Amino acid sequence: MVKHIVLWKLKKAQSDNAAGIAASLRSRFKALLGIVDGLTAIDVGVNYNGGEYDLCLVADFTDKKAQEAYQTHPEHLKIKELVHQVICGRTSFDYEYTA
């Protein structure tokens, strides 16, 4: 299994609406369940502890191949385009684990 973690920093103009943006993105990403093969769980949350990043996406995939397919899936790319309109920074971390 693969865990995919992405942290986003919102543009200053968007930071007051972090909860609303997270809710919208959560809904869009969760709609990928059952559409993207190998995607088993996905969620978006707001960082309530402060720090450099405002939002976090956490996704689980059956394997690396499923994660790679997700990266180029047309429905994911549509969401990614929206994300890039509201962020000014991003970092990610991926690792394999056993359930």
Image: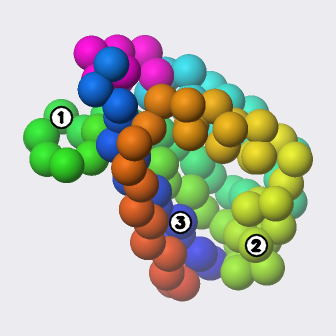
- Disc 1 marks a residue whose amino acid type is Tyr
Q: Secondary structure at mark 3?
A: strand
Q: Is residue 55 above or below residue 6?
A: above
Q: Secondary structure at mark 2?
A: helix
Residue 4 in the image: state x and y as whole percent: 53, 66
| Residue 48 tag number | 1
Of label 1 and label 2, which has the lower sequence position? 1
Of label 2 and label 3, which has the lower sequence position? 3
Secondary structure character of the magenta stretch overall:
helix
- Disc 2 marks a residue whose amino acid type is Glu
Magenta region: 14-21
Quickly name the residue at label 3: 4
Residue 53 in the image: state x and y as whole percent: 27, 46
Note whether residue 87 is visible. yes
| Residue 78 tag number | none
Q: Secondary structure at mark 1?
A: loop
Residue at image position (56%, 39%) is 84
- Disc 3 marks a residue whose amino acid type is His
Residue 22 in the image: state x and y as whole percent: 45, 27
Residue 86 horizontal side relative to residue 34, left or right? left
Residue 85 in the image: state x and y as whole percent: 55, 31
Q: Is residue 96 above or below residue 14?
A: below
- Residues 52 and 24: in front is 52
Quickly name the residue at label 2: 68
- Residues 19 and 77: in front is 77
Residues at marks 3 and 1, CA–CA distance in whole angstroms: 20 Å
Q: Split into 4 quadrants, where in the image is the C terminus?
A: bottom right
**Disc 1, disc 2: CB below 8 Å?**
no
Residue at image position (33%, 43%) is 9
